[in-house]
Amino acid sequence: MMSRYTLFGITIFLGFIFAVYYGWAVRPLAAANAAPVLLREDYRADYVVMVAEAFHADHNTERAIAALGFLGVEGEPYNPYAFVSDALTFGTENDYAVVDLELLQALAAALLEFDAGFAGTPTP
Amino acid sequence: MIREPERKPPFFLLTGLVFGLLLGFLLTWLIWPPRVTEVGPASLAEPYRAQYRLMTALAFASTTDLGRAQARLELLGDSDPVRALNSQAQVALASNATQREARALASLAETLAVHLASQQATAQAVNTPNPGDDSASTPIESVGEGAAYFLDDQQLTCESADAPPYLKIFIFDTNHNPQAGVQLTLSSTEGEAQFTTGQRPEMSQGYAEYALTPGIAYTLYIEEVQMMSGLQAAACETEEGEPAWGSWLLLFNTEE
């Protein structure tokens, strides 16, 4: 028969395993209060589509650039064109509606017109 | 007299388990939290959620596509999206620099509120029996090839104002005896339901029933052969004059 110490060790081990599984797989704390840089690719692409839709109404490039900053790392420089370009690639690969792709293309063109340097800046 | 040693309950096991749990949670939530790389909008911190909500409203102001805006708002997981939009609009309204944002948020909140109210009213209308409404007409007999049964009689019975709308089916064999174990299928836009006669022998061996959902049209199959289409819950009036859901009573006989 197992000694009390062995049983004590086994229950500690079981509790530990359960807590690790729960804390990492079932309810990881880091999933809450996340930053947009952690958004899944499709959500990032849809956010860029939203910016493109809003841009279609006001044609305000500066406002679009500011809105795209949402997808970058807070406090760090970002390349808005890279976000639009990524969304365009994702949209093309995932059969986005033609109208959405056209909006993204229009936004990309406006960003390059605003600052041609965006095209040469590497994706952060 | 020899006294047996007192047996203590194994509290040390519970202590060990709690100790293990504490160690585990300390590791996963404080020391070494998991690195999450892909989250949805619902997991964003509140200021980012507000920006996502605002962008949804600005995009809606441009496209007026409410379905798309609603789908995006659902991703945020707000318990009351209209209230969340209105609260954010109030905050934006306080600053001169964000009047445009406030208008977009308020406009989406208003459109969404009207849409949700109309959806609720429609659902209520569909679920309330209205004897004057003829939209749920008599089901149509549309027999497919190879049918072994034929419809002998159909009636709409109105029993009680509290009873849900039922489809009640009786099936008889060639000797006019109730027939158990006949496979019935009801298909609709909501899916398919299969059942057999004889599940309620106290009624009859050849009896089967199914509670219909108001507003949904069903097609009835017997032994996989289509028999009737356009079966819907129909409203009626009880003997006391109360509006109620009627039950369709269908009698099928076996082809000779």
Image (cartoon, coloured by chain):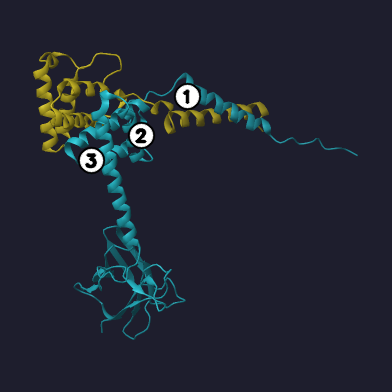
Chain colours: A yellow, B cyan
Q: Earlier in the sequence, mark 2 or mark 1?
A: 1
Residue identified by numbered label 3: B68
Q: Is residue B38 visible?
A: no
Name the image quarter holding residue B150. Answer: bottom left
Residue identified by numbered label 2: B87
In the rendered structure, which amino acid carries the disc numbered 3?
A: Arg
Q: Is residue B61 visible?
A: yes
Say the numbered circle drawn on residue A11: none
- Secondary structure of the residue carrying tag 2 is helix
Q: Nearer the viewer, residue A59 or A31?
A: A59
- Secondary structure of the residue carrying tag 3 is helix
Q: Earlier in the sequence, mark 2 or mark 3?
A: 3
Q: Nearer the viewer, residue B76 or B26?
A: B76
Around disc 2, counting alpha carbons within 10 Å, would you say few (fewer than 14), some (14 to 19), or many (20 or more)? some
Percent position of residue A27, x then y: 44, 32
Do the residues marked 2 and 1 share a common chain? yes
Residue identified by numbered label 1: B29
Name the image quarter holding residue A70. Answer: top left
In the rendered structure, which amino acid carries the disc numbered 2?
A: Ser
Q: Is residue A60 above or below residue B189?
A: above
Q: Quadrant of the C terminus of chain B?
A: bottom left
Do the residues marked 2 and 3 share a common chain? yes
Circle 2/circle 3 CB separation < 8 Å: no
Percent position of residue B144, x then y: 20, 72
Identify which residue is drawn at 33% across, 23% down.
A35
